[in-house]
Structures are given as C-alpha cells and as structure tokens.
Image: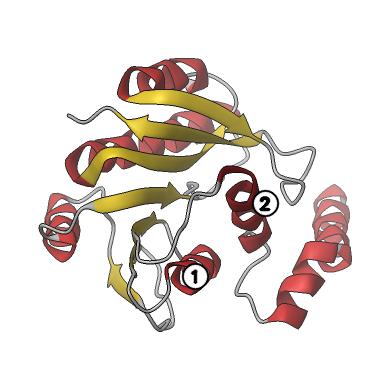
Amino acid sequence: MSRSKTSGKWLREHFDDVYVQRAKDEGWRSRAVYKLLEINDKDALIKPGMTVLDLGAAPGGWSQMAARLVGDHGLVIASDILEMDPIPGVKFLQGDFREDAVYQQLLELVGKRPVDLVICDMAPNMSGVNAVDQPRAMYLGELALDMVKQVLKKNGDFLVKVFQGEGSQEYRKDLQQNFAKVITRKPAASRPRSKEVYLLGKGFRGS
C-alpha cells in the first residue's frame, strides 16, 4: 500500500511539475534542459562554434540545447548507454563508456578536435539504497573526469552532476586540482529534496 502511495505521489509531482509541462510545450526532450539553461545563463558556458561533449545524454535535452547554442559551425558529441533519437548537429554514440571499447570509440569520435566543454548529467539506476547508489554515482563522476582529462582543451570547462554524500567532497577537491575555479550550482529546476548539485570546473589546467 505504501509503495503505491509513494508511486502516486511521484507521478503527481512529476505531472504537476511546471518544468515538465514547459518542456513539453517548448519542444524539449526533458525538464533537465532548464537546469542547463539556468547554469548557462549564469556562467556563459556554451558559445557559437564550440565543440561540446555530452556524457549520459539520453533522452537528449542537454544535447538539444547545446546544439542550438553552438550553431552550424559547432559540434555536439553525445554518448549514452540508452538509445537516443537523432538530433541535428549531434554525433551520437550508444554504449556504456565504462567499457573500454566504447570509451575508445568515443575518443575516436572526438579525434583531434579540441573539446571546449564537457557536460555530464549522468546518474546510475537508483536502487533507493544510499550505500549502493552513492558509490555508483561517484564512480560515474570519476569516469567523466577521466574522459575530461583525455579530451578537454586547456582552459576548457566541465559541468557535472554530483550527489552530495560520501565521496562528493573528495571529488570536488579533485576538480579543484584540475581547474582554476570550481563553482557549485543548484538550479531552480533541480527538485529541492534532491541531493543533486552541479559542479562547474572553469579553466582546465591541462593534463
């Protein structure tokens, strides 16, 4: 009984959510686009002509927004374990980049093109058990940072979702070692009860 009540509450919250309705009305693939939009408005991350790498891209809201902002002379490279419908201006690779073969394919897709910005809204499949979910989430963040060190150009930027909890402070310190400045953002579209925040590394020091 309690489970169905909880499910009902989530569904009500989801469909009453102003951002869900707004995304539907404005043709975006997910409400998450408004998180990126708010951060981009504050921090001017995405500019015309840029190359942007979007990790954990499906269903594609962030890639949609990035492709629009980089314009015809820019490029968005996106990757996810899930399928994603094509988006103009976006090169998409489906696969689990925790697997070395997929990781290498992604590096090949980037090639010698200098990446200006890496964005990562990845989250693991949540079990509801924090002792399981938190390490999984931090592992994805570590993998994203490893990719950043491979492809991001010097002075480039990195935006990543992190769940506050065990390992998140250490992860922030790791970012501080690799970037000139690290900023924490909690966009209005991020549900208040969620432990998610976004860490923005500005000015990659280079590997």
Q: Which residue is mark 1?
A: 60
Please name whichever residue, 193 or 150, is drawn nearer the observer in this view of the structure: 150
Residue 69 rendering spot, x and y as whole percentages: 49, 68
Is label 1 or label 2 in front? 2
Residue 60 rendering spot, x and y as whole percentages: 49, 70
Please name whichever residue, 164 or 71, is drawn nearer the observer in this view of the structure: 71
Q: Are there few (<14), some (14-19), or many (20+) residues within 10 Å of tag 1?
A: many
Please name whichever residue, 98 or 65, is drawn nearer the observer in this view of the structure: 65
Q: Are there few (<14), some (14-19), or many (20+) residues within 10 Å of tag 2?
A: some
Display colour scheme: secondary structure
Residue 48 lies in what quarter of the image?
bottom left
Residue 57 rendering spot, x and y as whole percentages: 44, 62
Of pointers 1 and 2, the one earlier in the residue sequence? 2
**Which mark is drawn over residue 38?**
2
Residue at 15%, 55% (x, y): give it: 107
* Secondary structure category for the residue under label 1: loop
Residue at 63%, 57% (x, y): give it: 37
Identity of the amino acid at label 1? Gly
Residue at 17%, 29% (x, y): give it: 207
**Which mark is drawn over residue 51?**
none
Residue at 46%, 21% (x, y): give it: 172
